[in-house]
Amino acid sequence: MQIAASSAKHGKTKLADQLRTLVDEARTQRSLHVGPARPVPIARPARDLAGLLCASYPETRLGDMVLTDELRQAIERVIAEYRARDRLRGHGLAPRAKLLLVGPPGCGKTMTASVLAGECRLPLMTVQLHALITKYMGETAAKLHLIFEAMESTAGVYLFDEFDAIGSTRSTTQDVGEIRRVLNSFLQFLEQHDSDSIVVAATNLLPMLDDALFRRFDAVLHYDLPAPQHVRPLIENRLSAFVTKRLTWKRIVAAAEGLSHAEIVRAAQESAKDAVLADTDTVTTKDLVRALTERTAYRTVAVSSSP
């Protein structure tokens, strides 16, 4: 683990102390709790990084994800380049460390950040956008600067989820100067970024992003709803502790059409609970189809009620 040595060397003792505390607490939490570690917020001081970052140590691995071959290869390449970063730099080459993930909700963007952290043995630093974005845009740019300083001090996977809050096009009607300056600040920080940290920006709203962003990222990864051939492994992964030998997959795949990875996994969880409540370890086709149909109904209601 790379601790905040460079901040301390440059007299930024508050920042260095905060980052040490953040990573140490996340590591301690992982050792004390079974399962994925919960995010640990930076608690002090009130200024600087307080509330801007939450750290965790995911144990997620690439094999836990159900992906297209293209996406899997792209993620494998990022991991391979990170592991070989010193050799690459020795030849004047930079590893891929600035990633833009685009696609519908629930299709694996956030999980990809967890996988990168797990595979690269890095903390996952999730940027808290509600604390970053304020009505005082000058303050937002200053907070962005702190986050990019943290990337230099402490290696990690830094996740900007719902990135469109920062990266929306500069020509929108809401753009009145200050928003442009925030985006320009982000572009400048991103272009200058050169550390052992990986920057991951995730968005559901690709058309809203400013064109200038794309050339600043090393790779743009596109996510989509799962193809029919991915439904079965998604469900089998989640139901590995249950008996699924007698399932009618044709009916199940048909019921899962139009659902995201997360929605399919949630339906599998519901069918698992049905089995537990029935005091059995066998999941039935009927329970799975019902759970998937319910998820489709929830999605329909959500879409119809949206403005």
Image (tube, rainbow, N blue to C red):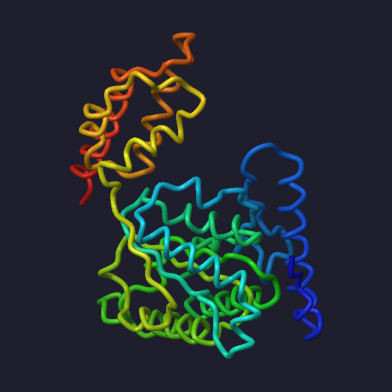
Q: Where is residue 267 in the image (x, y as percent from the top left)?
A: 36, 30
Q: Which of 137 and 272 is in front in this view?
A: 272
Q: Which of 275 and 37 is in front in this view?
A: 275
Q: Nearer the viewer, residue 20 or 131?
A: 20
| Residue lying furthest left | 304
Identified at 53% across, 83% down, the residue is: 189
With respect to residue 53, does 266 lie above or below? above
| Residue lying furthest bottom | 92
Q: Where is residue 198 in the image (x, y as percent from the top left)?
A: 56, 70
With respect to residue 294, does 234 lie above or below? below
Q: Where is residue 175 in the image (x, y as percent from the top left)?
A: 32, 79
Using residue 10 as the reference point, say whether residue 112 is left or right of it: left
Count of labels in the image: 0
- Residue 170 occupies which quadrant of the picture? bottom left
Q: Position of residue 243 (x, y in %)?
A: 44, 20
With respect to residue 68, does 182 lie above or below? below
- Residue 123 occupies which quadrant of the picture? bottom right
Position of the N terminus by quadrant: bottom right
Identified at 42% across, 65% down, the residue is: 74
Q: Nearer the viewer, residue 142 or 67?
A: 67
Identified at 80% across, 76% down, the residue is: 13
